[in-house]
Amino acid sequence: MPKKNMTTPKGYAVWPWLNEPDSRWDKPEYKVSLKMTNEDGAELLEKLQEFYKSGYMEEAKKQGKQRLKKAPMPWSEVEDDQGNLTGEIQFKFKNRASYEYEGKVVENRVVLKDRHGQIVESRIGSGSLIRVGFEPYVWHVASMGVGMTLRVKAVQVLELVEYNGGGGDDFDFEFEPTSASDTGSEDPFGF
């Protein structure tokens, strides 16, 4: 399938790993989910479904079959905690942090720019209003079927919510000075 770059409408970042890759698993990858209203995402969804359909038909022809198994798609309708639809859709984007080509490791960083085209250095957090530049890729694995990956390439940050590492600084806690010799309780754990 020929390469095709696409850009999303604006939406809200969910669990972004854009400044640095998520390296908790075997292959580190950049990733972000983008949440928007069904109305805002309808045109993008239609384009992705057409792209998938074309890739599916091409793969079926290559395999000499009329039907192939279909893998889960990288988008879904959003449900609240009670399982009710919220009227939103969420698209999942990812890309490996690096790959090997002709014996060399190639870095695959995501380009991060603001609304003025300036490079974004700040850590992008959940809730940031962004647009994602990506390449859709249709793949086939016999055990899973024909699927699609949305490879994140670039992100435009329209409204930044900076990631703070979850250090508790967003709360109005009052802290008192402590000393190692004065725990003030019989608690064996020093609470």
Image (cartoon, rainbow, N blue to C red):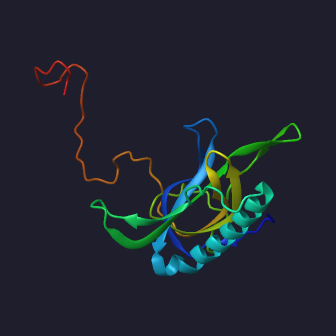
Q: Who's the residue at 22% across and 46% down the image?
A: 174
Q: Tell me if residue 43 can be seen.
A: yes
Q: Is residue 59 left or right of residue 34?
A: right
Q: Give coordinates of residue 23: x percent, y percent.
A: 58, 39
Q: Who's the residue at 20% across and 21% down the image?
A: 189
Task: Check the picture and name the quadrant holding the C terminus.
Answer: top left
Q: Tell me if residue 117 can be seen.
A: no
Extreme right residue here?
A: 102
Depth check: 185 or 59 in front? 59
Q: Is residue 11 left or right of residue 7?
A: left
Depth check: 41 or 17 in front? 41
Q: Quadrant of residue 110?
A: bottom right
Q: Who's the residue at 73% across and 44% down the image?
A: 98
Depth check: 46 or 163 in front? 46
Task: Check the picture and name the quadrant holding the N terminus.
Answer: bottom right
Q: Give coordinates of residue 118: x percent, y percent.
A: 67, 68
Q: Give coordinates of residue 57: x percent, y percent.
A: 72, 66
Q: Give coordinates of residue 39: x percent, y percent.
A: 48, 81
Extreme left residue here?
A: 186
Whether 88 is drawn above or below 165: the answer is below
Whether 16 is drawn above or below 188: the answer is below
Q: Is residue 71 left or right of residue 186?
A: right
Whether 17 is drawn above or below 58: the answer is above
